[in-house]
Image (cartoon, helix red, strand yellow):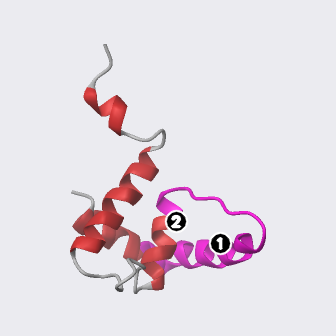
Amino acid sequence: MRSFLCKVMPACEGQYLAALIASNLVKAGLTNKKGILTNIRHLAVLLDIGESRRTGFFAIIGGILGWMAKTSKGQRVKAGLLEKYAM
């Protein structure tokens, strides 16, 4: 019999962490009224953690966000998000 975690965890641990951090950012009030993150670096890091891949026009935007997540400031933001919101 499969354990409970196998039923609720996505295939990738990164997707789970990204969803957990995103839900905690919403609870902390770091989104606008529509639920969109107010800090672009948080969005870039969440897409990087979740190993998100985009196609078409959004691949260009995704490339820019991926670059933002890979910079030294992006790495500091990633460490902070993982420490504070990935409980």
Question: What residue is shown at x 48% (from left), y 38% (from top)?
Answer: 11
10 Å neighbourhood of mark 2: few (<14), some, or many (≥20)? many
Q: Position of residue 59 (x, y in %)?
A: 72, 69
Rendered location of residue 17, percent (x, y): 37, 54
Q: Amino acid at mark 1?
A: Gly
Q: Amino acid at mark 2?
A: Leu
* Whole-percent x, y for residue 9 in the image: 37, 39
Range of the magenta residues?
A: 48-75
Disc 1 + disc 2, Cβ < 8 Å = yes
Label 1: which residue?
Answer: 62
Q: Which element type, helix, strand or loop, lies under badge 1?
A: helix
The foreground one among 45 and 15 is: 15
Which of the two labelled residues, at mark 1 and mark 2, occupies the earlier sequence position? 2
Residue at x 31% of width, y 13% of height = 1
Q: Can residue 73 be seen? A: no
Residue 64 magenta-highlighted: yes
Q: Which mark is residue 30?
A: none
Give the residue at x 65% y 79%. Answer: 64
Residue linked to disc 2: 47
Binning the other alpha carbons within 10 Å of mark 1 as few (below 14), some (14 to 19) or many (20 upward) gives: some
